[in-house]
Image (spheres, grey):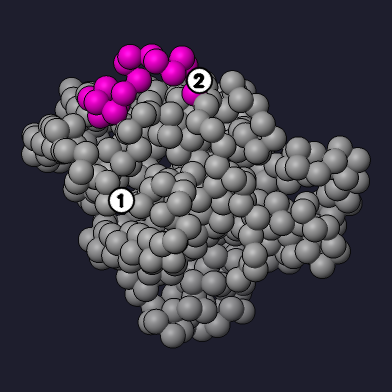
Amino acid sequence: MSGPMPVTPTQPVERPFHRHTRWLTAGSLVALMTLLQLGWLAAIWLTGATEATYKLLPLIMVTVGLGTIIYLLPERYLAWLPLDEDRLARMETRVLLLAGLLLGATLLIFASQQHLWAFDEKGNLTASYSVARKGVLALFENYDRRPWLGKQHPPLVPIIYGTAMRLLGPTQLAGRLITAVFAMSTGWLTYLIGRRLFNRQTALLGALLLFSFPLVLRLGSAAMVEMPLTFFFTLTVWLTLRVVERPSWDRWLLVGLVVAAGLLSKYTMVFVLPLVVGIVAVRGSKKQALCLAGAGVLAGGVLVTGFVVVASRVSVLQQQLATMREYAGLVLTNEYGRRVLLETITNRLPSALGVYNLPLLALGGLFTINRRRPVDWVVLLWILSVWLPLFLTLPDHRYFLPSFPAVAMLAALGLQQISRGTARGLLLSLLFAASTLYLYVDWVRSAALFVK
C-alpha cells in the first residue's frame, strides 16, 4: 500500500541503566508484572470497585498461574518466537498475518459478549441505525434532539457505521465489527510507524503491546467514536512522517483530509495539529514547521467558520458551544474536574494501560529521555500532545486512546532493555490482558476512589 519503506537499521542495544545491573532481568520483570497485576486485583476487591466480586478470586489464581508458568518456562520453548530483526525480515508477512488472525478473533469474540456501553455506544448505535434505515439526511432532520449527538458530537462516525450497516444489517454486533476493523487498522498503522521510526522488532512489539492495553480491547469491541478517532489520529501521524520525507502538495492535501475526517468524528482530533507541526520540526525543518503552523491557522479559521454555519443550520450551535466551554474548564475551574483528574491518574488510566505494563513504560520513558534522538521525540511529542491538554480539560481515560499507539511503542522500547526478557514480557502482557476480559465483559463500576 505504501511502497518501499525505509527501515532504520538495528542499532547496538542501549540501556537506561548500567549494562550489568543485576535486578534488570527477565525473572525480575515477570515477578514485578505479576505482583502489580495481583495488587490491582486486590485493590478492586478492597475498594469494592466492581459488582462482580466473585470473579476476583479466579482471576487471582489465573494471574499467579500465568506468572509462574512464564517465569519457569525454559528458554527453548520461547526461542521459536520470531522477535529478532533477522527472522522478522524473512517471516514478516506470516508473522503479521498470524498475529492479525489471533487478535482479530479475540476482538470478535469479545464483541459478541461485551455488555452495552450505556450512553455513548447506545447513542452511536441509535444514530447509525437511523442512517442505515432512512439515509444520511434523516440524521440531520432531528440532530438537535439526539442527546448524544446534538449536545457534543459531530456526525461522521454514525454516517460511516450506518452506511456499512446497510450491507451488514443494523445490529449491535455489526457496529462492533466495524469498530474491530478500525482497531486492527490502527494496529497495522502502529507497525508501519514503528518500522519507519525504529526497526521491525520495535514495530512488531509496539503493535502487539497495543493490544495488551485492556482499554484498546474494550473500545476496539464497542461501537463508539474513540477507536475511529484513534485510527484517523494514527493515520495522520503516518502520513505526516511520509510527507516530511517527500513533501508535495497532494500529500499535504491527504493529511488535511484525514485531519478533517478526524475532526468530524470527534473534536479532540484537534490535538493532532500541534503534533503534526512538531513532527515537521523534528523530522524536517523549523522553517517548514512555521509555514505549516501558519497554514494550519488559516485552515482552522475556515473549519471554525464552516462549523458555525453547519451547526447553526441543524440548531446545535448553542448546545455544542456550551458543552465545549464546560469541558474546557472542567479541571482548572471545577473541583469535580480535579477529582476526575486524580481518579484518572491513580487508577483509571493505569487500568486502561494495564498495571502490568507500567515497568515497560517506565523503562521506555527513561530510555528515550536518556537517548533523545529525533525519533524518540516524535513518540514523546505524540503522547504529550494528547496528555497535556486532557490533564487541563477533561481527563476521562477513554480520551487518551489516540496516544496509545505511541505509548505502545514506548513500552516496546522499554521491553527491549530486558536481557533475554522480550518474549517472556510480551507473552505475559498479552495473557494478562486476555485474562482481564473476563472481568470487563460485564464490568459495572460500583465504587470510585475520588469521584462521588
Residue bounds of the magenta highlight: 15-33
Q: Nearer the viewer, residue 121 or 200?
A: 200
Q: Nearer the viewer, residue 138 or 165?
A: 165
- Tell me the quarter of the image containing the N terminus: bottom right
Looking at the image, is 176 positioned above or below residue 65? Answer: below
| N-term-proximal mark, 1 vs 2 | 2
Is residue 155 rendered to the left or right of residue 245?
left
- Tell me the quarter of the image containing the C terminus: top left
114 is within the stretch colored magenta = no
Is residue 83 rendered to the left or right of residue 285?
left
22 is within the stretch colored magenta = yes
Amino acid type of the residue tagged 2 in the rendering: Pro
Amino acid type of the residue tagged 1 in the rendering: Leu
**Disc on res. 428:** none
Residue name at image x 83 percent, y 58 percent:
247
Looking at the image, is 355 positioned above or below residue 148? Answer: above
Task: State the residue position of label 1.
Answer: 81
> Does the rendering let one see residue 301?
no
Residue name at image x 54 percent, y 33 percent:
12
Q: Residues within 10 Å of mark 2 (few under 14, many from 20)?
A: some
Looking at the image, is 130 positioned above or below residue 241? Answer: below
* Residue 153 horizontal/vertical position (percent): 58, 56
Residue name at image x 84 percent, y 55 percent:
299
Callout 1: SS:
loop
* Residue 90 horizontal/vertical position (percent): 44, 61
**Disc on res. 16:** 2
Callout 2: SS:
loop
Q: Residues within 10 Å of mark 1 (few under 14, many from 20)?
A: few
> Does the rendering let one see residue 442?
yes
Residue name at image x 46 percent, y 14 percent:
18
